[in-house]
Amino acid sequence: MNDGFMKVFQRIKKYDRQRPFKPWFTRVLINTAIDHFKKKEKYAFETPLDESVEPGSEQTIEGNMAYEEILEMVRKLPPQYRAVFNLRAIEGYQHDEVAEILGISVGTSKSNYARAKAKLQHYLDVYFEIS
């Protein structure tokens, strides 16, 4: 809603006073909502509420690993790896978006993401005593 009002105020000079205001205003708000939906749609996924799991629940991975243990492994990552990993793997941003958010190059984002995954794989290997 705020984005829609901002667009109306920014584009008020483009409004044709010979035409009714309400349809123009409504069209700006609708188009803003559609743009917002399209922008966020690539990050959307559907999970029925009855199948969703509350974070911190005792759901396990591999039958041995609790949610908190996984979070602890992610927390052990160096800050630059953890930031990229969280934005890319958890939040669903693309590397160009991660790079812009963190003020780094796309190559650095990709590199840090690969290194974060490798470190997490090492932590999992140690956890499951895989040589």
Image (cartoon, rainbow, N blue to C red):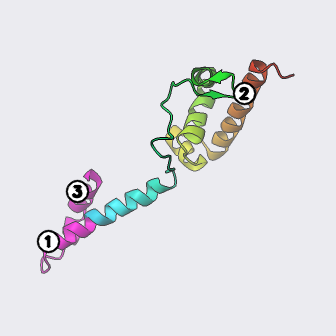
Quarter of the image where one finds residue 110: top right
Q: Is residue 44 left or right of residue 18?
A: right
Q: Is residue 44 left or right of residue 89?
A: left
> Is residue 84 placed above or below 69 in the rendered structure?
below
In the rendered image, which residue does mark 2 sit on?
A: 119
Query: Quick check: marks 3 and 2 in contact, CB under 8 Å?
Result: no
Find residue 129 and report its image quarter.
top right
Q: Is residue 103 above or below residue 4?
A: above
User: CA gap, disc 3 to disc 2?
Assistant: 45 Å
x 22%, y 67%: residue: 26
Question: Quarter-wise, where is residue 49 in the image?
Answer: top left
Q: Which residue is mark 3?
A: 5
Over which residues does the magenta segment extend?
1-28
User: Any mark on residue 21, and which?
Assistant: 1
Image coordinates for residue 109, horizontal then vertical, percent: 63, 41
Circle 1 packing at 10 Å, graded few (<14), some (14-19), many (20+), is few
Task: Tell me if residue 105 is in the magenta stretch.
Answer: no
Q: Earlier in the sequence, mark 1 or mark 2?
A: 1
Image quarter where the C terminus lies is top right
Identify the element where label 3 is drawn.
Answer: helix
Q: Amino acid at mark 3?
A: Phe
